[in-house]
Amino acid sequence: MDSTAGRAQLRRWDELYRAEATATGRPARKAILRDGWLDVDSAQYDGYRRSTLAVHRDKVAAGVYSVDPAIGDRPADEVSFEELAEERWLVGSADAIHSELDEWERALGIEYVLLRIRARGLPSHRDTLEQIRAFGEQIVAPRALSAAPRSPGGR
């Protein structure tokens, strides 16, 4: 599932996909592509917001978002980061990202997330590596620990 679809579109695609998987006797394994940035440094986050907004405004101008009723055929420069990010991207605090992941998992059964952290050369390579580390420590590790099967005796 792509990075431009909001929850309503994802639900429609999920229904079609599950029906086809059932009809063909295959498991419905689901992954989602999302842009993301953990807000651990406000200057880095501002750079991320600018570069990601520019990429997605180009997609708005190209008509990629035209099927989304919230965006439609509006001029690209009138579309904000906040409205594009809502229900689509993993951005903000660790708590906000965990909440969004929980919602995708609950509502759609998403098993895997492909995360795009860098757009058009911004943020810097160093900042991007810091983001990978921060996501690993604050998002991936806690989720992996909470999902890990426990052996008898709690070990």
Image (cartoon, helix red, strand yellow):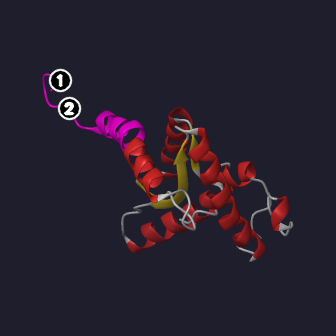
Q: Main secondary structure of the magenta part?
A: helix
The residue at 53%/40% (across/down) is: 97
Q: Are marks 2 and 1 in contact (CB under 8 Å)?
A: yes
> Would you say residue 147 is visible in this rendering?
yes
Q: For the residue carrying disc 2, how many other residues have a C-alpha within 10 Å: few (<14), some (14-19), or many (20+)?
A: few
**Residue for badge 1:** 154
**99 left or right of 111 in image:** right
Q: Classify 51 as above or below 108.
A: below
Q: Classify 35 as above or below 26.
A: above
The residue at 74%/77% (across/down) is: 62
Q: Amino acid at mark 1?
A: Gly
Q: Position of residue 145 (x, y in %)?
A: 29, 35
Q: Position of residue 32 (x, y in %)?
A: 49, 60
Q: CA distance from mark 2 to mark 1?
A: 6 Å
**96 left or right of 24 in image:** right
Question: In the image, which residues are magenta?
Answer: 136-155
**122 left or right of 21 in image:** right
The residue at 55%/36% (across/down) is: 93
Q: Amino acid at mark 2?
A: Arg
**Residue for badge 2:** 150
Q: Position of residue 134 (x, y in %)?
A: 41, 42
Q: Position of residue 54 (x, y in %)?
A: 69, 64
The question of residue 144 being in magenta is answered with yes
Label 1 element class? loop
